[in-house]
Structure formats: C-alpha cells, structure tokens
Amino acid sequence: FTLGPVTVRAMRNRHPPVEDSWALRFDGPGGSVTFSGDTAPMVEMVDFARGTDLLVHEAMLGAGIDALCARVGNGDDRLRRHLERSHTPAAEAGRIAADAGAGRLALHHLVPSDDPAFTEADWRREVARHYHGPVEIGSDGLWLGLEQNASGR
C-alpha cells in the first residue's frame, strides 16, 4: 500500500510456530528500509530486500546458543530447537544482505542479547563472512537515519 510518498510492502516470513510473522519494506523519496521481522533465514528475503538502502535483520550467534540454554536451564532442548529453526544466524543475515545488494545492514533482535562473553566483534566477524558493507549492531536507543543516495531517492 501507499502512505503519502512511501510505498509499504509486506512478506510473510518464517518463525515457527508463529504463522503470521511479517517482513516489511518501506520505499520513499529518502530511500528504502527493509525489516526482516522475526524469522528463520529464507532465500525469499534476498528478492524482497533487493537494492534496499538499509536492511534491518534479526541475528543469532550460534556460539551463544549453548550459553543461553545453559543459563535458562529449562532441562530439555525446546529452547534450542526453537532458536535453531526460527532465527537467523548472523552469518546468514550477512549473506542475505550481500546477495540483496543492501547498502547497509543493521542487526537487531540479537540472540543472545545480554551475554558479556559475546561482543560486537563476534557479531561483526560472523557477518563479515559474507557481507563487507557497513554494519550496525543494534542496541537500546540506537537511531539510524537514511542519507540520500547518489540517485537522489
């Protein structure tokens, strides 16, 4: 749909067991922003985000899953199964950004988000396996603007 000068598109993403989880894309005079939403990695995201100025994608550190599951200590593997089938490893978020030709990548909904054993360097190292553009690591209060690109969008 169109909201003033902004075109908004939605795509169902994959976040089992939730069926109605959505990625959103906003295209307007100042540029484009694509939000992955809460999702497992999906090849369809590449086309949905193609050429976006900023891709905001959820991300998970595989190395952090063990520590998170140990800390939560629910006694079985339900949390691990959910994380592995419903969320996107940081390296895959980087691959999606690279394949889509995203101008910038911002990681959000970080798993784990609060473990001091994992730093910004860990997130950047995983993303850099595939994506070599600018990367922002989400944190409370982070504000990201869109600068006009060379085409003047």
Image (cartoon, rainbow, N blue to C red):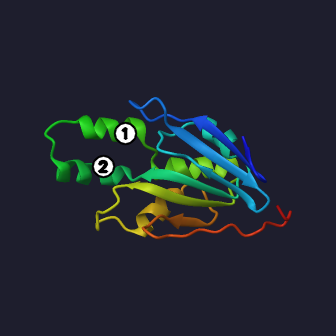
Mark 2 Cα shell of 10 Å, populated few (<14), some (14-19), many (≥20): some
Q: Nearer the viewer, residue 104 or 9?
A: 9
In the rendered view, does 77 fall on the left or right side of 103?
left
Give x and y (percent) for residue 86. 41, 38
Residue in the picture at 43% in, 43% down: 87
Residue type at the position of mark 1: Glu
Residue in the picture at 16% in, 42% down: 74
**Quarter location, residue 31:** bottom right
Q: Quadrant of the N terminus?
A: top right
Q: Nearer the viewer, residue 134 or 55?
A: 55
Total residue callouts: 2
Residue 93 in view here: yes
Which residue matches tag 2?
A: 65
Give x and y (percent) for residue 59. 45, 52
Residue in the picture at 53% in, 50% down: 93
In the rendered view, does 129 fall on the left or right side of 71?
right
Which residue matches tag 1?
A: 84
Residue in the picture at 68% in, 47% down: 100
Residue 43 in view here: no
Q: CA distance from mark 1 to mark 2?
A: 9 Å
Mark 1 Cα shell of 10 Å, populated few (<14), some (14-19), many (≥20): some
**Mark 1–mark 2 contact, CB under 8 Å?**
yes
User: Tag 1, which secondary structure?
Assistant: helix
Q: Nearer the viewer, residue 30 or 117?
A: 30
Residue type at the position of mark 2: Ile
Give x and y (percent) for residue 123. 45, 61
